Amino acid sequence: MKRLISLFAVIALCLCARAEVETYNIDPVHSSAGFTLRHVLSKFSSSFTKVTGTITVDRANLENSSVVASIDVTALNTDNEKRNTHLKSPDFFDTAKFPTMTFKSTSWKKTGNDTFDVTGELTIKDVTKPVVLKTTLLGFGSGMGPGSFLSGWEATTIIKKSEFNMAGPAMLAKALGDDVAVTINVEAGYKK
């Protein structure tokens, strides 16, 4: 009888440990965010190389997870210095006044085996609006360092730049599209 009670105690401890909420820190070296925007008849892409934040994960029920992330807009890179400078100007991001953009999730809805609609508040400049990130869990696994444990995520959405006061000068309104396709790739390490 004592053995049976001990076995149930061990199983209960394992289940409690597994249901524990885990906090993952976004690795800015192995994470990125970028966008694609129309320019006349083609498109150009850019990236932000400084993404930080945390993902709080309930692996027993991923719909209970949450994310808070920040992107350093001054780290914008379009592979063209003139375009970088213009996008950082008051016509668009106005990085002198608003050097970061943020996202804070409000809900996660499972849409497939490893996919979720992550709804949250996106703040760009002085505007905060709800957006839905189409998110895919790429997996959980051991990292390259001893004892490290990682999670991988990919998310996409489309926003309208005009809704975030980034329409740009009137002379560019026709040349530039309003729809901005956003892609976010995140590798995050487990924080014990």
Image (cartoon, rainbow, N blue to C red):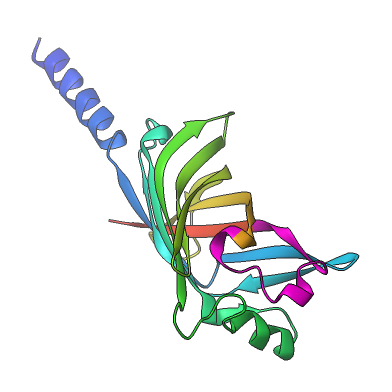
Q: Position of residue 91 (x, y in %)?
A: 62, 79
Q: Which residues are magenta?
A: 163-182
Image quadrant assignment for residue 30: bottom right
| Residue ID at (51%, 81%) | 95
Q: Is residue 73 magenta?
A: no
Of residue 12 and residue 66, the one placed in the foreground of this image is: 66
Image quadrant assignment for residue 180: bottom right
* Residue at the extreme left of the image, as rendered: 2
Tell me, yes or no, if residue 26 can be seen here. no
| Residue ID at (29%, 33%) | 19
Q: Position of residue 162 (x, y in %)?
A: 62, 61
Q: In which quadrant will I find the C terminus?
A: bottom left
Side (left or right) of 86 relative to 187: right
Of residue 26 and residue 168, the one placed in the foreground of this image is: 168
Tell me, yes or no, if residue 173 can be seen here. yes
Q: In which quadrant will I find the N terminus?
A: top left
Up the image or down, 54 lies above or below 106; here it is below
Of residue 18 and residue 135, the one placed in the foreground of this image is: 135
